[in-house]
Image (spheres, rainbow, N blue to C red):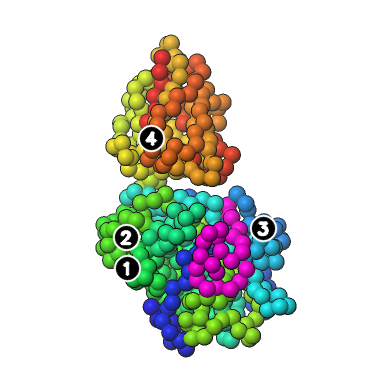
């Protein structure tokens, strides 16, 4: 795609196969003579939507973003990954609070700085979670309220703020871009009053997404410029229609759409069939995109350091599909036999549970992590009670993530009557039947499967469970 008419150079040039950083701003901050106001909280989801995950950046001034939510990238590359993050950007990413910190007023700041020797530092963060994806038959939305660095003209040469998402399989591989997919929710270079939204997929160079450029579009920010005010940037992945769609918005105004048929089935499947995406926020300095738009190398001696990207909030929402999936066995009003297989997706209530197609047929519940639960009503144990229970589970959890699958009765906060630990089984559809001891229980109860872990990551899927006597 081409830059806005105010640019002096050349067509859009693909940046890196990188992880970007999203910055969201909250409260009132004085920046370069402009007063910017953060919202009080992450907006509640509209009717029909639910919140999957969010961060409002309400930490104390001078503190780093939550380690439970964010990983801080450092240096000039991932270990074993392409140098300069694959894009030619020149800054050194750090975990210094001078480059990334809360401002104490509800905002996160990512601030590029230049040292006395002319070297640049900045920051890039990515979410711990890497499982954000559209539920089957539903819609995923990724949203952030952000003010781009408030700098324009020659003083902005080389500034490259971004809010984006990268396919989970990139972690630990770093050579599989662009096939695993990249959704650029917001990109900007050189202080131009424009937001770019871009999809990267397939193969490079060329391929169905025209790499290394990607399939992109741009527009000016509505009302106030992108640099002088906060705007809301949103990306939607709509799996509720056929062909599926990807959509980009700024302040609620649609400006870019890519369809499944436009990309082709092979590339679409490759970028949508894995575990999901993680989110990134960063401010790069220099590199292929700003250099291509400027028509020369950036940053320059005229580039002014110290202008932060402000992030008010980042949120992920979903609608339909896995939010309220239809059960595949009919529990309402009927009695469940505790000693027959209970299909996990036939729950009567849930918290944090997704439903997806299962490789063993039917569906399974998925993306289960600490604090999630599923409820099954009218489970009849009889007068003797069970000796143990068995669940059909699978896990592709990486990084040593594991947790407990627990059984509780009549309340998700009751003491567990049984549990077993589960870690990686070889994949999210690599199933095994795992038994666990269970305490005495008789009569009819609501049974809760609850999921407890010391890490924030997803750690298990469940296909079915049963009790044995």
Q: Nearer the viewer, residue 442 or 296?
A: 296
What is the chief secondary structure element of the magenta stretch? loop
| Cβ atoms under marks 4 and 1 closer than 8 Å | no
Sequence-first disc among 2 and 1:
1
Query: Callout 4: few (<14), some (14-19), or many (20+) C-alpha neighbours within 10 Å?
Result: many
Residue 267 is marked as 2
Residue 210: give x, y in percent of width and height: 34, 71
Residue beneath the point at 54% across and 41% down: 400
Label 1 near label 2: C-beta < 8 Å? yes
Which quadrant holds residue 60?
A: bottom right
Give the residue displayed 61% in from the left and 58% down from the top: 72
Figure quadrant of the N terminus: bottom left
Q: Secondary structure under badge 2?
A: helix
Residue with the mark numbered 3: 64
| Residue picked out by circle 4 | 431
The C terminus lies in which quarter of the figure?
A: top left
Q: Name the residue carrying label 1.
A: 207
Q: Which residues are magenta?
A: 69-92
Using the numbered discs, state the Cα–Cα distance from disc 3 to disc 4 in whole angstroms.
Answer: 39 Å
User: Which comes sooner in the sequence, label 4 or label 1?
Assistant: 1
């Amino acid at each position: 795609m081409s830059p806005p008419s105010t640019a002096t150079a050349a067509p859009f040039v693909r940046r890196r196969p990188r992880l970007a950083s999203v910055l969201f701003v909250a409260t009132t901050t004085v920046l370069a003579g402009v007063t910017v106001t953060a919202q009080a909280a992450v907006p509640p989801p509209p009717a029909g939507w639910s919140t999957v995950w969010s961060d409002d950046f309400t930490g104390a001034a001078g503190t780093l973003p939550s380690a439970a939510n964010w990983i801080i990238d450092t240096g000039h590359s991932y270990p074993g990954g392409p140098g300069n993050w694959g894009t030619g950007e020149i800054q050194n990413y750090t975990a210094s609070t001078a480059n990334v910190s809360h401002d104490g007023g509800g905002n996160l700041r990512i601030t590029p700085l230049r040292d006395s020797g002319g070297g640049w530092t900045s920051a890039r963060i990515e979410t711990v979670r890497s499982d954000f994806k559209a539920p089957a038959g539903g819609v995923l939305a990724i949203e952030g309220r952000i003010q781009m660095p408030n700098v324009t003209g020659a003083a902005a040469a080389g500034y490259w703020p971004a809010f984006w998402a990268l396919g989970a399989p990139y972690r630990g591989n770093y050579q599989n871009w662009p096939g695993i997919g990249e959704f650029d929710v917001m990109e900007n270079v050189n202080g131009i009053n424009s937001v770019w939204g871009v999809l990267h997929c397939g193969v490079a160079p060329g391929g169905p997404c025209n790499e290394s450029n990607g399939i992109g579009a741009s527009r000016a920010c509505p009302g106030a410029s992108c640099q002088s005010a906060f705007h809301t940037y949103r990306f939607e992945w709509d799996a509720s229609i056929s062909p599926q769609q990807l959509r980009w918005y700024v302040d609620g105004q649609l400006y870019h759409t890519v369809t499944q048929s436009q990309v082709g089935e092979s590339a679409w499947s490759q970028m949508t069939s894995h575990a999901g995406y993680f989110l990134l926020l960063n401010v790069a300095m220099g590199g292929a995109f700003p250099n291509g738009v400027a028509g020369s190398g950036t940053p320059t001696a005229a580039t002014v350091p110290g202008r932060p990207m402000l992030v008010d909030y980042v949120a992920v929402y979903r609608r339909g599909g896995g939010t309220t999936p239809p059960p595949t066995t009919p529990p309402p009003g009927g009695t469940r036999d505790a000693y027959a297989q209970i299909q996990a997706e036939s729950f009567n209530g849930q918290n944090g549970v997704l439903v997806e197609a299962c490789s063993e047929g039917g569906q399974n519940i998925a993306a289960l992590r600490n604090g999630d639960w599923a409820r099954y009503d009218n489970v009849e144990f009889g007068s003797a009670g069970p000796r143990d229970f068995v669940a059909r589970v699978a896990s592709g959890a990486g990084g040593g993530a594991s947790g407990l699958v627990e059984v509780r009765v009549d309340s998700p906060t009751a003491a567990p009557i049984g549990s077993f630990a589960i870690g990686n089984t070889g994949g999210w559809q690599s199933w095994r039947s795992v038994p666990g001891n269970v305490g005495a229980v008789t009569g009819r109860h609501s049974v809760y499967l609850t999921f407890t872990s010391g890490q924030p990551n997803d750690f298990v899927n469940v296909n079915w469970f049963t009790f044995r006597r």
